[in-house]
Image (cartoon, helix red, strand yellow):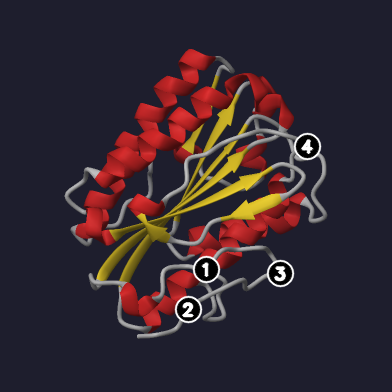
Amino acid sequence: MSKTVYDISGADIAPNLPVDEIENERQTLFRFVVDRSGSMDQYAREMEYFLGVQKEALGESKQEDEILMGLTLFDDNIDHSGYRLIEDFPTDYSVCGRTALYDAVIEAADGLYMGDGTGYMEVLQQQGVKTKACFFVFSDGYDNVSRAGVANAKAAIERLQNYEIIVAFVEFGPDAGGVARQLGVKGENIINTTADKHALRQLANVVSKSALSFSASAAAGQSNNAFFV
């Protein structure tokens, strides 16, 4: 198993963990797609805390060697880290610019499961790795700069959901209300919360608890439709 997957959609995606470096035949993939537009400026410290909590919680789980994590950060530009070991998950966070939500969702979804065998999840499965995945999106506002439209982003999310990949979405604050439903995310996997620092710190614990539950069920070979617990 020696295939390494790089960019499959024209996006600047850092390399994933090479398949021949995966030691466990079962893997759960987590992709965090996180808004870093200028409106998140006052929450930068809390958002870094949020990412750190996810890394710490999953790193302490019994399934730690069965989890790979990837991060997508977006403003006007989009930066993707590949799926890597938990210890290599980046948590640095800074803000700038506008909100390319649709483009970020499409690029990250394509990198996970494309439907033509090139997505990282597909490559793992082709090599005999039993794989589950969760695609988590966090945004505090509507898209205002993407090249792609909402229909394209919705189609990407529907493709993931049709393949039984959990898509979860946190709408942070009133300006993001309704975005997840517009994108076709299932209602039980949407959280809308007030835009304040306390709420963001609470969310960190909610999401990490849900991620742990999801990884445990995936390790047990169970299928769940809902992410948040």
User: Which numbered circle lies on residue 15?
Assistant: 1
- Between 51 and 150, the residue placed more toward the observer is 51
CA gap, disc 3 to disc 1? 13 Å
Q: Amino acid at mark 1?
A: Pro
Residues packed near mark 3 inside 10 Å, few (<14), some (14 to 19) or many (20 plus): few
Q: Residue at x 44, y 58 (%)?
A: 165
Whichever of labels 3 and 1 marks the residue nearer the N terminus, that label is 3
Image quadrant of residue 192? top right
Q: In this view of the protein, which residue sits in the foreground, 26 or 180?
A: 26
Is 60 positioned to the left or the right of 7 in the image?
left
Q: Which residue is mark 2?
A: 4
Q: Which residue is mark 4?
A: 98
Earlier residue among tags 1 and 2: 2
Identify which residue, 181 or 165, lies in the foreground: 165
Using the numbered discs, state the Cα–Cα distance from disc 1 to disc 2 in whole angstroms: 7 Å
Q: Residues within 10 Å of mark 2 (few under 14, many from 20)?
A: few
Proximity of marks 4 and 3: CB atoms separated by less than 8 Å: no
In primary-sequence order, the first of circles 2 and 3 is: 2
Q: Secondary structure at mark 2?
A: loop
Residue 18: x and y in percent read: 41, 75
Please give the name of the residue rendered at 64% of the width and 53% of the height, measured from the top-left corner. 79
| Front label number (2 vs 3) | 2
Tag 3: residue type? Answer: Gly
Indicate the secondary structure of the residue bearing disc 3: loop
Measure how far apart labels 2 and 3 are at the Cα level.
Answer: 16 Å
Q: CA distance from mark 4 to mark 1?
A: 26 Å
Q: In the rendered image of this protein, does residue 114 appear above or below residue 139?
A: below
Query: Circle 3 is placed at which residue position?
Result: 10
Q: Secondary structure at mark 1?
A: loop
Tell me which numbered mark, 2 or 4, is placed earlier along the sequence.
Answer: 2
The mark closer to the camera, 3 or 1, is 1
